Image (cartoon, helix red, strand yellow):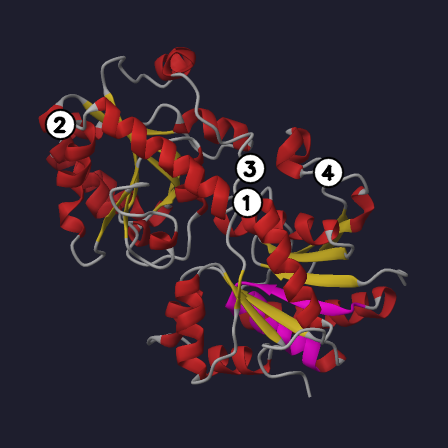
């Protein structure tokens, strides 16, 4: 067994998986090693046969090769990744996971567990912690609370997880308030926000992106609406398509999807292409970009970045676009208003009125250059001030103290 405290982190996704959950899992695991813990990550995957366990050190993951994105991570042995193949349903997977964790615990001796997302990772982390007699923490990241609290969500499992975990963290103040509402008591959940690397996500002159623009088939005089992540209904796909169509009124406009479109949404894109064939041709999809520096390069092509989420936590894409000095037009879902001050660091639309997205985008595209420059500068300054590694480290340190019983304010303790 290790002579240093070892934290077991259970996650649904971990790089090279795509998406915000995978990226925040990786970033959090690295940050915890900087605070003196060894971290073992158990990540479920469909890329392995059911029940197969593979263990490694993820030093070859590209962010480690991008300098500042991985931070000063000298001892690669402090992070161990266990990938476990999923079965055909989650019930079987969790039963097998319990057996695997019991076996790993015998050789490692975990001091605490971390569930990244309330379900299934958080539930599994609390179940194992209760069984092993160690403390646990659950990290609410986005719509995990909403999915479980409303039908057909598993409200009983949600409540059991929140009540039995030692301490709760979440990605936004909005989520913290929602958790306290469900529990009916003040537990002071720690807000551990997403953070941005300002040396990767930074403004650049538009002239440096001409080659990339041409390679994507984007005209030099074409407006670019940007979206970053996996485009789907939750992220406001219908409203983004409407905004693309309406924005043609102020000049040729394309939609740049920095990421991918969820397969189940392809039918909606096909319908749009039948109704508006010429406009549909101006949807450019990059596919998954492995390196964060490539994501940042593509942000630089955008005149405005869209995030009209129907529900959300505090999306990485919003913070990254702002750090790149881009104007974001977003809904007021979840914790987004904690990053965007309407009219000062970006623009917010009530999530019940997202049909106004197209008009808001047109207003931004026609905005005087001095006003645009002021908002772009304020957006980056706001992110650098409030969503940085120092703030993250402070909150993570407090969370680790709660896990070890050194600070009050946690949820119900393990009994």
Q: SS for tag 1?
A: loop
Q: Earlier in the sequence, mark 1 or mark 2?
A: 2
Is residue 157 rendered to the left or right of residue 256? right
Kindly tell me whether residue 14 is visible in this rendering: no
Q: Earlier in the sequence, mark 4 or mark 3?
A: 4
Give me the C-alpha separation between circle 4 and circle 3. 13 Å
Q: Position of residue 47 (x, y in %)?
A: 60, 48
Which residue has dot 3 on it?
197
For disc 3, the neighbor class at 10 Å (few under 14, some 14 to 19, many from 20) is many
Q: Earlier in the sequence, mark 3 or mark 2?
A: 3
For disc 2, the neighbor class at 10 Å (few under 14, some 14 to 19, many from 20) is some
Cβ atoms under marks 4 and 1 closer than 8 Å:
no
Q: Which mark is residue 72?
A: 4
* Snapshot quadrant of residue 164: bottom right
Which residue has dot 2 on it?
248
Is residue 243 rendered to the left or right of residue 43? left
The magenta-colored residue range is 110-130
């Amino acid at each position: 067994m290790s002579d240093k405290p070892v934290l077991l982190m259970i996650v649904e996704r971990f790089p090279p998986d795509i998406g915000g959950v995978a990226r925040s899992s990786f970033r959090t695991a690295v940050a915890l090693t900087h605070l003196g813990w060894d971290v073992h990550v158990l990540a479920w995957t469909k890329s392995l046969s059911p029940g197969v366990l593979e263990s490694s050190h993820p030093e070859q993951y590209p962010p480690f090769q991008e300098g500042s994105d991985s931070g000063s991570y000298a001892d690669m042995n402090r992070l161990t990744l266990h990938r476990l193949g999923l079965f055909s349903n989650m019930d079987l997977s969790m039963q097998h996971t319990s057996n695997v964790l019991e076996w790993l615990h015998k050789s490692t001796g975990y001091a605490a567990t971390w569930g990244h997302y309330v379900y299934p990772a958080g539930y599994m982390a609390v179940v194992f912690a209760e069984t092993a007699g160690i403390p646990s923490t659950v990290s609410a990241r986005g719509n995990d609370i909403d999915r479980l609290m409303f039908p057909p969500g598993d409200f009983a499992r949600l409540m059991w997880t929140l009540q039995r975990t030692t301490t709760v963290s979440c990605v936004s103040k909005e989520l913290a308030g929602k958790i306290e509402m469900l529990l009916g008591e003040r537990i002071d959940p720690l807000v551990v926000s997403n953070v941005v690397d300002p040396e990767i996500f930074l403004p650049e002159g538009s002239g440096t992106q001409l080659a990339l623009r041409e390679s994507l088939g984007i005209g030099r005089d074409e407006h670019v609406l940007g979206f970053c992540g996996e485009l789907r209904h939750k992220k406001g796909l219908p409203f983004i398509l409407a905004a693309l169509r309406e924005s043609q009124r102020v000049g040729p406009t394309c939609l740049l999807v920095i990421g991918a479109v969820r397969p189940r949404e392809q039918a909606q894109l096909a319908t749009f292409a039948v109704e508006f064939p010429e406009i549909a041709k101006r949807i450019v999809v990059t596919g998954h970009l492995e390196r964060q520096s490539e994501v940042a390069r593509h942000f630089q092509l955008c005149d405005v970045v869209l995030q009209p989420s129907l529900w959300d936590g505090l999306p990485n894409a919003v913070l990254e676009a702002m750090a790149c000095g881009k104007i974001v037009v977003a809904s007021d879902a979840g914790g987004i208003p904690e990053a965007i001050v309407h009219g000062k660091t970006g623009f917010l639309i009530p999530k019940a009125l997202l049909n106004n997205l197209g008009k808001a985008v047109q207003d931004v595209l026609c905005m005087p250059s001095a006003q645009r420059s002021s908002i772009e500068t304020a957006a980056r300054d706001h992110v650098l001030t409030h969503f940085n590694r120092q703030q993250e480290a402070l909150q993570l340190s407090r969370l680790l103290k709660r896990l070890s019983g050194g600070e009050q304010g946690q949820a119900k303790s393990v009994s």
